[in-house]
Image (cartoon, helix red, strand yellow):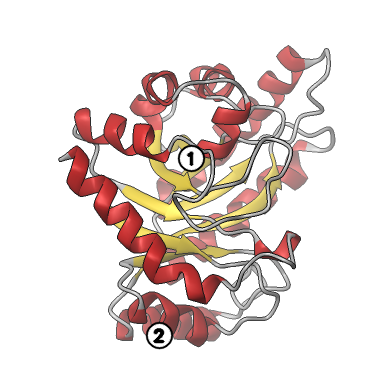
Amino acid sequence: MKLAFSTPGVPGLPLTDVLGLAAAHGYHGVELRAHAEEPVHPGLTPEQRADVAAEVKAAGLEILGLAGYVRVAAPGDDDTVVGEIRALLDLARDIGAPFVRVFPGGDGGENAEEADATAARRLGTAAEHATDVGVRILLETHDSHPTGADAMRVLGLVGHRQVGALWDVMHTWLGGEQPVESFAALSPHLGYVQVKDIASADDRTPLRLGAGVLPLTDVVETLSRHGWDGWLCWEYEKRWYPDAANFAELLTPGREHLARLLNESA
C-alpha cells in the first residue's frame, strides 16, 4: 500500500511546503483539500493548474485526490451541485489527481430514502463527466452516511464504475461498524482509505497514529488479508482543532506506525 497525508488544514499553507513535508518524511503522495482558502481549488487558471502538476512531479510525489466539499444529498438545486462536482473533476484532470472526494451531507433525519435518491441522481449525472475526464468520484463515509452500509445505499443506486467510496475509518467506527463489515460493504467500490486517531468518541482532537482508540490495526489487517493494495491517507484535522499537536512533528512517527502495521499484517 502507498502512504499519503491530507493537507493538514492550516489555511494558506503553500503547496511547496506541503510537498516538502511529504518528501522529507517518506510519504508517496498527498491529498489536497480543494477549498478556496487552500492553494489548490477550482478557481485556479489553466496556467496555475499546469504549475501545480509540474511542481508535484518535480517533487517525485503523486496527488492522491482532491478533497472537495460538495454535499451530494443536501437539499437544493441539482444543477448547482452537479456543476460543483464537474468543476472538481476538471481540476483533478488538470493536475493529475485520480479521485475527487464528495460528502453525503444529508440531514440525517426521517427523509433518508429521499436523501439517498437525491445523492444517487446527482452522482449518476456527474458520472458521465467523470468518465470523460478519467477521474473517479468518491463518496466519503461521513455525516449523514457514516457507515459502509449507509454509503452503499447510495452507491447501489448509482451503479457506475466512476463513482466509488472513500472509507473514513473514524466515521464507520463512530457508526458502530467493525472494519471487516465496512470493508465488506465498500470493497467493490473502494477508492482509498482515510486513517486518523482520536482519544474517544466524545473527544475527536486528532492524535498521533496509534495513540488513540480507532481500530487501525484491524483496518490494515483486513485490507491486507483481502489483498487490497491502494492508498492509506492520514487525515489530521488541525484546522478545526487549533490546540492539536504540530502535524509536522508527527509525520515520521505516523508513517512508521503505518509501516509497522503493514509489516505485521503481511
Q: Element at badge 2?
A: helix
| Dot 2 crowding, Cα within 10 Å, few <14, some 14–19, many 20+ | some
Instruction: Write the residue at 28% across / 79% down.
Output: 60
74 sits to left or right of 103: right
Q: CA distance from mark 1 to mark 2?
A: 26 Å
Q: Element at badge 1?
A: strand
- Residue 61: x and y, percent? 32, 73
Instruction: Write the residue at 71% across / 25% down.
Output: 118
Q: Indicate which disc residue 55 carries.
A: 2
Q: Is residue 166 above or below residue 15?
A: above
- The answer to the question of whether label 1 and label 2 lie on touching residues, with beta carbons closer than 8 A, is no
Tally of numbered discs = 2
Quarter of the image for residue 107 reads: top right
216 sits to left or right of 59: right
Q: Could you tell me the amino acid type at mark 2?
A: Glu
- Residue 169: x and y, percent? 50, 37
Give the camera-side residue of 238 and 217: 217
Quarter of the image for residue 193 reads: top left
181 sits to left or right of 125: left
Q: Is residue 171 above or below residue 137?
A: above
User: Which residue carries the number 1 mark?
Assistant: 166
Give the camera-side residue of 69 and 231: 231
- Residue 45: x and y, percent? 60, 80
Give the camera-side residue of 82 and 242: 242
Q: Could you tell me the amino acid type at mark 1?
A: Leu
Residue 63 in view: no
197 sits to left or right of 255: right
Instruction: Write the residue at 61% across / 26% down.
Output: 120
Residue 266 in view: yes
Q: Quadrant of the C terminus?
A: top left
1 or 2: tag closer to the N-terminus? 2
- Residue 16: x and y, percent? 49, 87
